[in-house]
Amino acid sequence: MPASCPDCARHKLRAGAACPAPNDQVDHLLERLKPRLLIFDEFHSALRGRRQDVKAIFSFLRRIARVHDISPVLVGEIAIYDAVHDTDEMGSRFDTIPIPRWAYDEEFATLLDSLEASLPLAEASDLSREPLVKILHDLSEG
């Protein structure tokens, strides 16, 4: 690689300053924070890459579970189920729990009320009142 390569400069700086590599940084952060659970929302988007990248992602999930005792929660479309159950190894590591979409009803309005109550708003937004509740339900697809 040429001496002007940005990666070379980064590696030299990292070596000189004793900066940890990105994987070490993640491990250090997880050791420090000690999360028991990591939620990966829209995880199906991670499955749209090359096969080797998807394998690396699942390898990472196995490693954080094994090394840091973290339970990953994968949230998204049905493609996640298919990818996880593609091999027995991954299928046996995850419990699959389908979560139904919210119906447009009183329970959805109650959910919005509880979310609004938990936020430190200066003024109420009235999320559970028409027509806003209907718009929110339609936009979120339940």
Image (cartoon, helix red, strand yellow):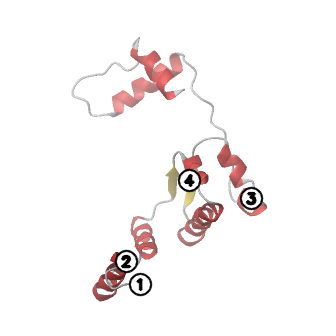
Measured from the top left, where is residue 8 in percent x and y? 36, 82
Q: Is residue 12 above or below residue 75?
A: below
- The residue pinned by badge 1 equals 1
Secondary structure beneath dot 1 equals loop
Upstream in sequence: badge 4 or badge 1? 1
Q: Would residue 142 be seen by someone viewing this image from the given angle?
A: no
Closer mark to the observer between disc 4 and disc 2:
2
Measured from the top left, where is residue 63 in percent x and y? 58, 69
Closer mark to the observer between disc 1 and disc 2:
1
- The residue pinned by badge 4 equals 46
Upstream in sequence: badge 4 or badge 2? 2
Q: Residue at x 51, y 59 (%)?
A: 36
- The dot on residue 92 is 3
Q: How far is disc 3 from disc 4 in space, using C-alphas?
A: 20 Å
Q: How far is disc 4 from disc 2 in space, using C-alphas?
A: 25 Å
Measured from the top left, where is residue 12 in percent x and y? 32, 86
Secondary structure beneath dot 4 equals helix
Upstream in sequence: badge 3 or badge 2? 2
Q: Is residue 70 above or below residue 42?
A: below
Secondary structure beneath dot 3 equals loop
- The residue pinned by badge 2 equals 7
Secondary structure beneath dot 2 equals helix
Q: Residue at x 56, y 26 (%)?
A: 102
Q: Is residue 42 above or below residue 115?
A: below
- Furthest toward the top, the residue is 130
